[in-house]
């Protein structure tokens, strides 16, 4: 039975990874300090003998008794709201947390996979963004704490590969959505869905012409699994290359929810990227991966999950 450690395992993506690897027959050790994650996200796994939850802050030393085959480092606040709310914690988990997770992989001779992000490209001047693009990041801007934390984490990961021979993988994750996202996450899709279901106006920043490429979480998990099992050590973009405007996304959410909420426009936040679209040539050619979940299908699954949770909280507008 392979043993796999997932830091940030009670978060949105981390919980789906824990679920996936338990189903694949791994013993999974989920490590999370619950700063932005939730124990509810993994509650359905806690009766399984192959799953262990550990309340721990990865910015301090990580000790896991026994052998470890894989370390997946997914711990980090990731919402734009967190960039202002938790900037120091983001930098610490990108630096100290990555260092400690790499140290665990080195000590256990385990394979290490870093969750990086499309944010390493900043506000890009090329579209779509290939892994060879070095980015356009404002290191002192509000978003810089997340962008630079992930860029540092990539550099440290490569240093451990070169100096210590740690077997490393780097996934650059583009906008991902699905069940278990925080209801007040702060990113576009969960904002739109929560606002539509609670009867609040949908907040569109700028004129809504900025673009995003939304990928469903099950597609991301499949890509991560393929990358982990591959011999590809260079960064790999995993995301859906279908690009839409945020205004179009808001209108699609209104249609699928049947909401009568209005659209309201607010000033564009500082540093908000104008375009975001992955070049997935490397993932397609080296991993045999392409996304399979249609956007509207993924939307509906996410809306159904949000509706159930909002109803349980008494916040659903009938």
Image (tube, rainbow, N blue to C red):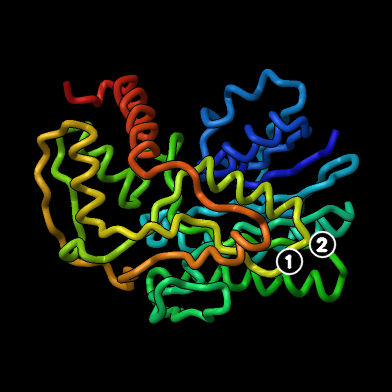
Identify which residue is drawn at 60% across, 53% down: 289
Q: How many marks?
A: 2
Residue drawn at (26%, 59%) of the image: 245
Q: Would you identify the image quadrant in which residue 19 lies?
A: top right
Is 111 on the left or on the right of 287, as rendered?
A: right
Residue 136: % across, % down:
44, 81
In this orientation, which residue lies closer to the viewer: 100 or 242? 242
Residue pictured at 62% horizontal, 40% vertical: 17
Q: Position of residue 41 (x, y in %)?
A: 53, 31
Q: Please name which of the two marks, 2 or 1, marks the residue nearer to the observer.
A: 1
Task: Identify the residue under disc 2.
Answer: 167
Residue 146 visible = no
**Mark 2 in CB contact with mark 1 (< 8 angstroms):** yes
Give 255 or 308, whichever is nearer the viewer.
255
- x and y, in percent, of residue 64 in the image: 82, 43
Circle 1 sits in a helix, a strand or a loop, which is it? loop
- Alpha carbon separation for disc pair 2 and 1: 8 Å
Q: Secondary structure at mark 2?
A: loop
Marker disc for residue 233: 1
Where, by quadrant of the figure, is residue 66 drawn?
Answer: top right
Q: Toward which corner of the image does residue 82 lie, by quadrant?
A: bottom left
Numbered badge on residue 241:
none
Q: Nearer the viewer, residue 220 or 294?
A: 294
Is residue 51 shown above or below 177?
A: above
The C terminus - image quarter: top left
Compared with 15, 117 (above or below) is: below
- Picture layout, residue 152 above or below residue 5: below
Graded by Cα atoms within 10 Å as few (under 14), some (14 to 19) or many (20 or more), the crowding at tag 1 reads some
Identify the residue shown where x is 72% and y is 30%. Answer: 52
């Amino acid at each position: 039975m392979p043993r796999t450690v997932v830091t940030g395992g009670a978060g949105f993506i981390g919980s789906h990874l824990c679920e996936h690897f338990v189903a694949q027959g791994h013993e999974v050790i989920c490590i999370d300090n619950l700063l932005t994650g939730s124990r509810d996200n993994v509650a359905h796994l806690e009766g399984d003998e192959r799953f262990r939850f550990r309340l721990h802050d990865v910015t301090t030393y990580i000790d896991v008794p026994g052998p470890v085959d894989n370390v997946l480092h997914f711990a980090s606040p990731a919402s734009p709201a967190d960039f202002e709310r938790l900037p120091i914690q983001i930098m610490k988990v990108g630096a100290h947390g990555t260092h400690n997770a790499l140290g665990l992989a080195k000590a256990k001779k385990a394979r290490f996979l870093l969750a990086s992000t499309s944010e390493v490209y900043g506000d890009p001047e090329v579209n779509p963004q290939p892994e060879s693009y070095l980015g356009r990041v404002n290191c002192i801007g509000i978003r810089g704490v997340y962008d630079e934390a992930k860029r540092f984490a990539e550099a440290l990961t490569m240093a451990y590969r070169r100096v210590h021979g740690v077997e490393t993988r780097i996934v650059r994750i583009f906008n991902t959505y699905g069940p278990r996202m925080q209801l007040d996450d702060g990113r576009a899709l969960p904002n739109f869905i929560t606002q539509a279901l609670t009867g609040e106006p949908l907040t569109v920043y700028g004129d809504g012409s900025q673009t995003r490429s939304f990928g469903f979480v099950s597609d991301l998990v499949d890509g991560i699994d393929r990358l982990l099992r591959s011999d590809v050590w260079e960064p790999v973009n995993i995301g859906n290359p279908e690009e839409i405007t945020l205004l179009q996304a808001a209108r699609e959410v209104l249609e699928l929810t049947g909401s009568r909420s209005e659209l309201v426009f607010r000033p564009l936040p500082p540093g908000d990227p104008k375009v975001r679209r992955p070049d997935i040539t490397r993932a397609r050619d080296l991993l045999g991966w392409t996304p399979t979940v249609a956007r509207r299908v993924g939307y509906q699954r996410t809306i159904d999950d949000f509706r159930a949770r909002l109803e349980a909280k008494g916040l659903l507008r009938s």
